[in-house]
Amino acid sequence: MQPFTYVRAQSLNEALQQAAQPGAAILAGGTTMIDLMRGDLAAPSSLVDIGHLPELATIDTDGPVLRFGALVRMADAAENPTLLRDYPALPESLQQAASQQLRNAATLGGNILQRTRCPYFRNGVSACNKRVPNSGCSALDGEDREMALFGTSDLCVANYPGDWGTALAAFDTDVEISSATGRRTVPFADFHLPYGDDPVVETVLRPGEIVTAITVQATPLGRKSTYLKVRDRQSYAYALVSATVALEMDGDHVRAARVSLGGVASRPWRAPEAEAALVGRQLTQATALEAGDAAFVGARPLRQNAFKVELGRRVVARAALLASRRI
């Protein structure tokens, strides 16, 4: 770990001023940043600790928009009674993420900023265009079981690992961002960038900017929603495939649908093809599987991860049926 200066911000304004300094990075829950610094994957000259700013640590579920301060702990959102009743996919995604100890420390804002778990990125020595531009991608000729099927490029096939981000992608979500020069709001669908020719840049967040809140439009789709995650072991593992399905039903017919995928893409991945396959149709095992098929149209499997296509098809179908049974 490289030497750095630690600054504990006493106000959001102070945090924004400190974040604007060259080489500064933000510390919130610390569960990602400290790991990156220990692995020499991040080497900020100063670390601005915003973890003690109460105005960024509240959940507001009243009104037409759900508002999550960036410093809300994952564990607190996972246990929120309103979310559990009206938007179960959101807390379910958090309950299945990380360990209870990590959820007690990690924040919602930090969670959407977590970086890939690709071992070639994390080990610090393999060729990795995401870590060192133009150095190559060891995954292209190496172990690729965990890699992405969607949103990859010839330079990078790394997976986005987040559960919370996958659930957010199924709803109308925005990210509030502040800096010393002002505020802006970015649709969550645009927050993570496609790899393209520059996999180093993963989000639209600019130097000096801080994620201050995440907002979700209230919707009747939330009640019949679920997050289903399949992983190698039941505890503390990233998704092989996950799916969020949110439905609005008219009897046994689907009036509206939202579907997003995790564990299979370079960023939280909305699946409009699956939604189109569900809307206006009676929900049965067969139509649910058709939606699963549609979700994986356009997938680009590698040598070892083609199994995710069939697995994902079944995860989407299962999630749709589970969501439809919500009260």
Image (tube, grey):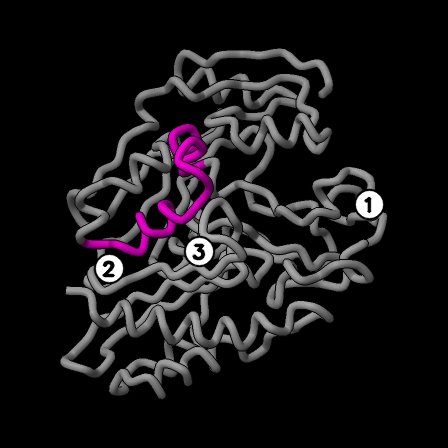
The span from disc 1 to disc 3 (Cα, nearest Å) is 28 Å
Location of the C terminus (image quadrant): bottom left
Residue that badge 1 annotates: 126
Residue at image position (16%, 79%) is 250
Which of pointers 1 and 2 lies earlier in the amino acid sequence? Answer: 1
**Camera-side mark, 1 or 3:** 1
Residue 189 visible in the displayed image? yes
Q: Residue 172: give x, y in percent of width and height.
A: 34, 57
Q: Is residue 160 left or right of residue 290?
A: right
- Quarter-wise, where is residue 100 in the image? top left
Query: Furthest-front residue in view?
Result: 233
Q: Main secondary structure of the magenta part?
A: helix
Disc 3 and disc 2: Cα gap in Å? 14 Å
Quarter of the image where the N terminus is located? top right
Position in image of residue 23 (x %, y %): 67, 23
Q: Secondary structure at mark 3?
A: helix
Is residue 70 left or right of 191 when viewed as pictured?
A: left
Q: Amino acid at mark 1?
A: Ser
Mark positioned earlier in the residue sequence (3 or 2): 3
Q: Which residue is mark 3?
A: 166
Q: Mark 3 packing: few (<14 Cα in 10 Å), some, or many (20+)? A: many
**Residue, x 31% and y 21% (percent of image)?**
54
Type of the residue with mark 3: Thr
- Magenta residues (range): 86-109
**Circles 1, 2 touching at the beta carbon (< 8 Å):** no
Mark drawn on residue 222: 2
| 94 to 247, vertically: above or below | above
Q: Distance of mark 1 from mark 2, alpha carbons?
A: 42 Å
